[in-house]
Structure formats: structure tokens, C-alpha cells
Amino acid sequence: MCDRAFWKGRVRMAVPSLFLLGFHFIFVLGGLTGVMLAVLPFDWQAHDSYFVVAHLHYVLVGGLVFPLFAALYYWAPLYNGHRLSERIGRWGCGLMFGGFNLAFFPLHIVGLAGMPRRVYTYAEGLDWTLWNALSTAGAYVFATGVLLCLADLVRTLVRPRREHGDPWKADSLEWLPQGDYGVRSIPQVASREPLWEQPALPAEVAAGRHWLPGTVFGGRETLVTSPVRAHVTHLLRLPGDGWAPFVAAAGTAGFFLLLTVAWIVPAFIAGGISLGAMLSWLWGSDRPPPRDMAAICAGVSVPATASGRASHSWWAMVILLAVDSTVFASFGFAHIHVSMALDVCPPPGARLPEGGLWAAALLGLASALMAWAVHSMKHARQRALRLAVVLALASALGAMALDWGMHLQAGLSPRANAWSATVAALLAWQCFHGLVLLVMGSYVLARSWTGKLRQDARATLDNTALMWHGAVAQSLIGMALVRWLPSWMGT
């Protein structure tokens, strides 16, 4: 991207491109030092030294900060229509680039000279003083560049709002006229550079001459297309503004951050708040459409909703199950690896739990009952659906409790040996899914009792059934690994 204003007969590169060039230089250098640290003999020498500090900052600042400022300078006009100052941006980018390299490149040298991490003072005569003085000066230069760019940002954001147009003469659709709702109509494009190939496209979109020119259901909406040929299949209602998603995100962040400092009780309080906000948010998302078909253009109508494999939420649950299964596979691999490394499996002091067939039968029954619930939904039998979900919950939780009790009766001691620890990890993962099924099953029951679970608003049930079958399959595989793997190994 180049600025079309000429300076001394040459085309000037715009500020976003300058920041991106800085990103490439700094990030590549950080990657090269990462390759050096991947060499074990060198890592022995440089580990826990200032060389590692320099490497981390080249990767993190180069990979995050410089692209962030490039994005600020490029997309700032979307906020109020005004570009940030090119002159101030050049000065800021130059100060940040020069200051950063002055601050952190000497740390490679002082690290190789033996300076360890996490020290604030050191003895004289170690030849570290000059390099640290240069780093300090570079830090001030870098901070000056950051403050200059931030001041430019504040100055621009307080200016009166106007239409942003296409300030960079770009070819991409983010420069179409739009408000908080998005574009006035969804454009039909026929090339990779639509704003260059179709100069009248912004005016056409603003006039509503393309797809979905007005809201059908009084909220945010978009069109879902087929994955290959992009044929419009149905209308998708998008969530609107609200406090619930914000509270859910804040609670999730609080849960994980508080766990890092071992504040267990506040962490679980934050997690509970997040879960409550998610359920509140979801409560209004799975709603029946006012009518079956939605007009999206003159003479063109599509289904107003979708269910099953045609639904985006169904595929989102499939992806979640794939990720969830990956975590389970890592636990299973750890158990198999430890079992194969043993001379005798289970090791001395540990023994296999007895039985397991009753627990496996209950798990299979839980999956069958959830399939019955889905079948009852097709025939609008809400009482049968609720009975099936209650029995499925009882069967799944009963199976997990029975399996856990048999392991405790066998004397499972996770701290005694690695084999028992891997068994405990599989059990804990199974019990965690029991809690997930309890929440999801209770949510389905609440939707059914309040009359919100219907044939035309059934994503809650379909997605819960997918998670149910996935959790049951994982539990059955985990039970088989623990009980029958030793016999397969012949030990």
C-alpha cells in the first residue's frame, strides 16, 4: 500500500506499511534467535540469560505491537471518518522502530556476556554497563514513539464524525458505507477487487440494491451460503448488543487469570458468573422465526431458519467435539505410554477396578435415551422428551458415579505412581463431562418446560444430543483403556 501523494518525485509508503515492514524485520530477527535457542548446546549457555529476554521481546513486540499500530493507522477512519496524521505516524514509527532495536538488540550481547534474567543491579567490571545504558536510552525513545502515536490517536478520535469513504483507495469491502448494523445490503461481487472493478458498488449497497436490503426480523441478520458455490441457503439471525456477552467474557478471563495466582474460590465465583451470563445470553438466541420464509431480494425468498446439519451451531458443536476429543486423546495417549513402559501393568501397589459392564451399559442407555428425546421432538411429544432427558441424565451421572466408586474401591492413589495418575486424569475428564451434561440437560429441560423448545427452535436439543453422544463415547473408550488394555498387552 502506497500513499498517492508524491514527495520529491517519488511515491511515499503509507504509515501502516511502514509499521508492517518494521514487524517483518523485528519478527524475523526474533524467529532467528528462536532457532538458535532451539539448538540444545546453545540453549544450555543462553538459558535464563538476557539473550532470552531479547528473543522474547523481539517475538512479542514484533509480532503484536507493530501490527497493532499498523491496524490502528489503517482502520482508524472506520471510527469517525478521519485518518491519523501521516507525518506524526512516520515520526512515531521511526522512534518506535529505532528505540526498540536500541533497547533490545544490546540485550543479546549482554546476555551472551553472562548477564542473568530478573536482576536489577550488578557489580562493576562485568562489561555490562554500556549495553544496559544503551538499552535504557532505547526504552525511552521507544516510549516516546508510542506516546506520540497515542496522542495522534486521541487527537483524531475527538474530531467530528463524517463519512469515511475509501481513504486508501483500497479494493476491499470494509470500506463500504455502513453503520452499527453493518452494510445496508449485502453486495454481490464478481472479482477479488470489487471496489476497483465496480466503482458504483458503494452507492448501490447504500441504496439497498443488493441482497437483504432491510432487516426481516428487526435485528442483525446475514445470509448463509453453500461452502463451494456460495448459493444462498437460509437466513441467519445474529446476536445483538447486550451486557451478557461482555460479562461472560470478563468472567472467563477472571476464571483463568485468578487460577494462575491460586485464588481458587474467587476463580470459581468468576467462572460461575461467566456460566450464568452465557446461559442468559443463549436463552434468547434460539427463537422461532415469525415466518418460515424470508424475502431477501425482489422475488427471492429463503428459509428463515435451519436445523440439524444445515445449522451453523450444529457444525460449531462438531468442531467443539473435535477439540474436546483431542484433549481426551492426549490423556489416553499418556495412559497408553505409561502402561507400555511398565514391566507389569498395573504396577505393584495398584490394581484394576472390578466390573465395568454395568457402568458401560448405563452409558449406552444414556445415549439411547437422548436419541429418544430427539425422536420425541420430531413428533412434538414434550412430556416424552422431558422424561427421556431426565432418565438420560440419571443414567449418565449414575454410570460415572459407579465407575468412580469402583476405582476408589480398588484403591486408586494418583500420587503413588504415574499409572494411577493417568487413570485419575481420565476419570476426572469423565466427571467433568458429567457436570457439562448436567448443565446442558437441565437447560434443555428448562427450555421445554417454558415452551421455548419447538420444532422450529430446536438447536438447543440438537447440540446437546451431539455433546451427549460424544461424552458417552469418550467415557466408554476411557473405561476400555483402563480395564482391558492390560489384557491386550498380555500383562
Image (tube, rainbow, N blue to C red):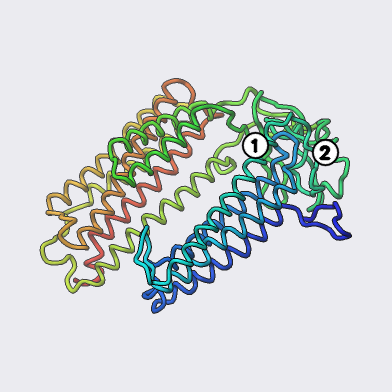
Q: Locate residue 162: give its quadrant.
A: top right
Split into 4 quadrants, where in the image is the C terminus? bottom left
Q: Looking at the picture, which amino acid does disc 1 mark?
A: Val
Q: Is residue 97 left or right of residue 169?
A: left
208 or 38: nearer the viewer: 38
Pointers 2 and 1 in contact (C-beta within 8 Å) = no
Tell me residue 133's x, y (percent).
Answer: 49, 62
| Residue drawn at the location 17% of the way across and 51% of the way down | 407
| Residue drawn at the location 70% of the way across and 29% of the way down | 294
Q: Mark on residue 51? A: none
Q: Residue furthest front?
A: 124
Split into 4 quadrants, where in the image is the N terminus? bottom right
Mark 2 vs mark 1: give the one in front.
1
Marker count (numbered): 2
Is residue 206 visible in this depiction of the protein? yes
Q: Is residue 281 left or right of residue 192?
A: left
| Residue drawn at the location 43% of the way across and 76% of the way down | 39
Q: Looking at the picture, which amino acid does disc 2 mark?
A: Pro
Does residue 223 lie above or below 332 as drawn?
A: above
Q: Give the mark, 2 or 1, whose residue is nearer the N terminus.
A: 1
Which residue bears the numbered disc 2?
Answer: 202
Q: For the residue labelled by badge 1, is the local secondary structure a helix, a strand or a loop?
A: helix
356 or 147: nearer the viewer: 147
Tell me residue 393's x, y (percent).
Answer: 32, 36
Q: Residue furthest top?
A: 450
Tell me residue 17's x, y (percent).
Answer: 71, 56
Tell me residue 256's x, y (percent).
Answer: 38, 44
Is residue 385 visible in this depiction of the protein? no
Callout 2 environment at 10 Å: few (<14), some (14 to 19), or many (20+)?
A: many
Q: For the residue labelled by badge 2, is the local secondary structure a helix, a strand or a loop?
A: helix
Which residue bears the numbered disc 1?
Answer: 154
User: How far, Cα to Cα, is label 2 from label 1?
Assistant: 29 Å
